[in-house]
């Protein structure tokens, strides 16, 4: 259905855009044919302490992979995100903080205040002996202090590793030890959905197996009593009072590390992705500005957690580099009720709203009436990231949230890519529900056959790889360059391997079909999990679905579907038959599900992605060894699925 469905940019989007369709085509071509010239100019958007003379110095040649951008330039990320805005925008709000509980007060932090907070914290870090190149682990809830902590590290050249506040002590200690942090920044407690999260207690438990940690800086957040270990734990506020409110930004080489971040673990053990200074900031700042057509003064809200790359690139670094106003939300979409997101949109007159398909599907499951209670007229543009968005969820988002007025940008990218890779530019690239559309400047996607042949024709299907480097690319896996080279450059020599499958349609649009490891092979036909899932979600009673293969005597692989219904729908057998017929009609007989298991909940990573790896094990009736489950949000969901498995 969806390939033919095209949404032209609205007249408003065309009127305000800084990129027309023709400009996109021309600039894209130039970015590919003359990367040095293109990026030399684009990099001028940043303030350089020492101008670079070299632009691109990269090789994807296995095994000598090496990636350097702007390698002799110097700059500081925090100066670019704060100091340079002070002359003209000191009183502009940089961060809006919306608390978990709607009864509590929001906070508004101007660029001037941000400067002072970051400088003080940077001086506290220095006073505690943190030096350029040292790693600092940040384990904080969604409070402004998380952004201060990241920027304070950047200011003095320390490398931050943010660990999502929902992770257990074990996951935390593993990540602290992997990068060898001597200092951890945390809070007494966090809040989510009306419940307290015992962050400091988790740190205490984690540190039992982290002998290298000397200092814990604690932010007083809920104010509840927590244990403080003498000689190790100190309150940030007390320390910050004792230091200067000014801290000169450290000149950093463009290739000095900025942060380490572990991937979300959908496919296996998380990787410590390392990003550096210059190329990363050019990339996130340019992509943020163009994909959202962002202009300072607009209220921008990305609902991700700062513990994920989306929070790094598109709550903190991209928006602040662009002198933007970025909203940080401490809470969850479902508490106190399913209109919580829309209350926040109304309260702060949000113009740009960026979230994940998992949240959209959950809100869709709760019912459209929840979108009717608030004034959403401030919204101009909606974004999606994290998984392929099912066309049905896209249309729901468009109709009930965007009121058929807002542009939608579906941004495909990865922790490894630093920022957007395939995304529409509003006003320039028409949208197709379910497609991330076209490559961003400098991105050269190729579709490979499973054997690694480049599919030259426009209409093609296969493995998504990238043929050349872009400034925001990760540089290595921290402490394990060989793993970096093996993971991304050994399967298809000369290319960066994304791990995702895709289809390119006759218009040159890219459709992510799911992870390559998840592709189904049914009677010799290759089928993307995303396609079958989208067909199921298109049924009016289905809220969410996950599809995996399992060994099948006749077909090679059978299609095993886990289905969550809309709130209030009854789980009965007649509906299973109806759904099988439905998918058959939508895609074709080859895609007819063999087994449908009702799943009131699906196993997800803590960033909300479905872990098909685990579902595959259950479908294969091989559930004793589920692999790394440390990133699961709710282990209880798996037990329920195992108990009710169908292929015994
Ligand atoms: P791990 O690499 O540890 O298995 P992960 O791949 O989930 O975890 P991320 O870097 O957070 O870690 O996610 C990137 C992946 O998310 C992409 O490779 C792709 O599969 C999926 N993805 C992100 N955005 C989109 C999108 N707009 N459309 C389709 N898929 C997307
Ligand atoms: Mg990945």
Image (spheres, grey):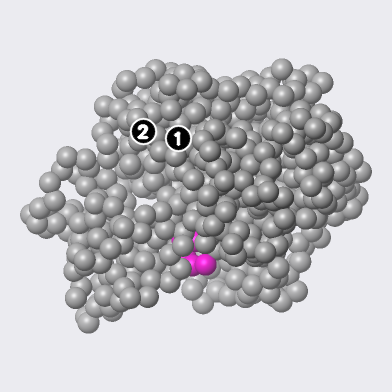
Which element carries disc 2, helix, strand or loop? loop
Crowd around label 1: few <14 · some 14–19 · many ≥20 (10 Å): many
Residue behind mark 1? 331
> How many badges with numbers are in the image?
2
Horizontal and vertical percent for residue 582? 18, 53
Residue 451 visible in rendering:
yes
Which element carries disc 1, helix, strand or loop? loop
In this rendering, would 575 be left or right of 3?
Answer: left
Horizontal and vertical percent for residue 60? 71, 68
Residue at the outermost bottom position: 553
Horizontal and vertical percent for residue 111? 72, 25
Horizontal and vertical percent for residue 251? 88, 44
Most common secondary structure along the magenta stretch: loop
Which of the 4 image quarters holds residue 313?
top right
Which of the 4 image quarters holds residue 173?
bottom right
| Labelled pair 2, 1 in contact (Cβ < 8 Å) | yes
Q: Which residues are drawn in magenta?
A: 265-269
Which of the 4 image quarters holds residue 369?
top left
Residue behind mark 2? 335
């Amino acid at each position: 259905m969806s390939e033919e469905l095209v949404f032209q940019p609205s007249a408003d989007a065309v009127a305000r855009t800084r990129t027309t369709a023709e400009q996109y085509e021309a600039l894209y071509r130039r970015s590919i044919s003359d990367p040095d010239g293109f990026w030399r100019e684009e990099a001028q958007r940043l303030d350089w302490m020492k101008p670079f003379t070299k632009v691109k110095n990269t090789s994807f040649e296995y095994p000598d992979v090496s990636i350097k951008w702007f390698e002799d330039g110097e700059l500081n990320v925090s100066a670019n995100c704060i100091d340079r805005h002070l002359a003209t925008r000191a009183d502009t709000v940089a961060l809006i903080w919306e608390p978990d509980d709607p009864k509590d007060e929001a906070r508004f932090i101007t660029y001037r205040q941000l400067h002072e907070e970051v400088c003080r914290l940077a001086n506290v870090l220095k006073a505690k002996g943190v030096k350029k190149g040292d790693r600092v682990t940040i384990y904080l809830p969604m409070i402004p202090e998380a952004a201060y902590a990241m920027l304070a590290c950047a200011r003095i050249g320390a490398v931050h590793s943010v660990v999502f506040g929902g992770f257990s002590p074990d996951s935390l200690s593993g990540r602290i030890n992997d990068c060898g942090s001597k200092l951890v920044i945390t809070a007494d407690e966090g809040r989510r959905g009306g419940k307290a999260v015992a962050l400091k207690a988790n740190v205490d438990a984690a540190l039992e197996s982290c002998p290298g940690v000397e200092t814990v800086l604690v932010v007083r957040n809920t104010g509840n009593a927590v244990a403080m270990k003498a000689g190790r734990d100190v309150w940030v506020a007390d320390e910050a009072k004792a230091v200067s409110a000014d801290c000169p930004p450290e000149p950093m080489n463009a290739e000095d590390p900025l942060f380490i971040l572990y991937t979300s673990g959908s496919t296996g053990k998380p990787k410590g992705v390392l990003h550096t200074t210059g190329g990363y900031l050019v990339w996130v700042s340019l992509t943020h500005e163009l994909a959202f057509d962002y202009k300072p003064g607009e209220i921008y809200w990305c609902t991700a957690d700062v513990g994920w790359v989306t929070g790094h690139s598109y709550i903190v670094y991209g928006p602040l580099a662009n002198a933007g106003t970025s909203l940080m939300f401490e809470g969850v979409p479902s508490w106190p009720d399913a209109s919580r997101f829309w209350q926040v949109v109304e309260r702060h007159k949000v113009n740009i709203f960026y979230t994940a398909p998992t949240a959209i599907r959950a809100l869709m499951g709760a019912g459209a009436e929840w979108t009717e209670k608030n004034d959403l007229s401030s919204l101009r543009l909606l974004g999606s990231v994290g998984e392929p968005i099912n066309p049905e969820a896209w249309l729901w988002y468009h109709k009930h949230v965007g009121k058929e007025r807002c542009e939608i940008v579906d941004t495909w990218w990865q922790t490894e890519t630093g920022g957007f890779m395939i995304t529409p530019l509003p006003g320039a690239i028409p949208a197709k529900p379910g497609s991330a559309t076209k490559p961003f400047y400098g991105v050269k996607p190729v579709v490979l056959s499973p054997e690694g042949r480049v599919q030259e024709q426009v209409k093609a299907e296969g493995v998504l790889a990238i043929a050349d480097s872009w400034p925001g690319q990760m540089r290595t896996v921290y402490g394990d360059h060989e793993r970096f080279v093996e993971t991304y450059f050994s399967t298809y020599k000369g290319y960066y391997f994304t791990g995702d499958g895709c289809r390119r349609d006759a218009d040159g649009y890219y459709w992510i079909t799911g992870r390559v490891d998840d592709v189904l092979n049914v009677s010799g036909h290759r089928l993307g999990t995303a396609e079958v899932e989208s067909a199921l979600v298109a049924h009016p009673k289905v809220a969410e679905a996950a599809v995996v293969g399992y060994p099948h005597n006749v077909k090679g692989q059978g299609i095993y579907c886990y289905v969550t219904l809309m709130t209030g729908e009854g789980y009965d057998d007649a509906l299973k038959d109806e759904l099988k017929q439905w998918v058959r009609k939508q895609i074709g007989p080859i895609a007819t599900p063999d087994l449908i298991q009702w799943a009131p909940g699906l196993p997800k990573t803590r960033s909300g992605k479905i872990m098909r790896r685990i579902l595959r094990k259950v479908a294969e009736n091989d559930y004793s060894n589920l692999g790394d489950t440390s990133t699961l949000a709710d282990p209880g969901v798996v037990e329920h699925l195992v108990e009710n498995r169908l292929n015994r």
